[in-house]
Amino acid sequence: MDIGSMLHSLAHKIVSQPRVYDWVQKAVGGEEVYRFLAPHLKESAGHSLLDVGAGTGNNRKMLPDSTRYIWMDNDARKLAGYRAKQGCAPGVLGDATQLSFRDKSVDYGLCTAVFHHLNDAELGRLVDELARVIRRRLIAVDAVQCLDRPVSNLLWKYDRGSFPRTAERIRAALARRFHLEFVDELTVYHRYILCIANPKA
């Protein structure tokens, strides 16, 4: 392994620590993304919401108090970080491409910064699973590939996700199983796409 790969690997290990992870999310524009996303989460009041790829549970603070929040991620360290904030809050450790939930068992699904961690086959399985378990609506936001943005390209170089996609490819992946009801974009350091979508019958 060359020195560059070693430093890259070390950086990923450091960022995987919950407190460092939260700091990095804030530093790269996380607060702006949360404000962009928050208005679309109000309708989850009184309903269940499954947060897939929930990290340390930062999305929880944007939800109405009456939302029944279900944390899910595949990283036990992120679960520890979430519980450090929320006490003994329940969480589900698992694979996003094989959701351990019954058909139509949650009202809302939320995916933030998940898609770029998955290859095309995995993304297809995630979309299938989300369409299977969600009753009402999917709310998804992810950074998109923008080759004309040097700062964004630098951030992608150090991101743990290896599969940045254009906005068009993300829309196409979702449209196979969802009706896209609303799409918007935000630019901070990255450019982000927000998709609000209903499962197809």
Image: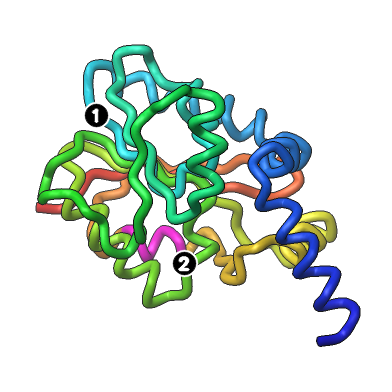
Tell me the residue at 72%/61% (across/down). 12
Residue drawn at 37 percent across, 19 percent down: 42
Q: How many marks?
A: 2
Nearer the observer: mark 2 or 1; the answer is 1
Q: Which residue is mark 1?
A: 48
Q: Which region is colored magenta?
A: 169-174
Q: Amino acid at mark 1?
A: Ser
Q: Could you say where residue 119 lies in the image, as x and y percent from the top left?
A: 47, 74
84 displayed left or right of 159:
left
- The residue most toward the right is 3
| Contact flag, marks 2 and 1 (Cβ < 8 Å) | no
Q: Which residue is mark 2?
A: 169
Label 2: state its secondary structure.
Answer: helix
- Dominant SS type (magenta): helix
Quadrant placement of the N terminus: bottom right
Q: Taking 1 as reference, is 107 above or below it? A: above
Which label number is shown at residue 59? none
**On the picture, is 163 further left or further right than 51?**
right
- When the figure is inspected, residue 101 is found, relative to residue 146, above or below; the finding is above
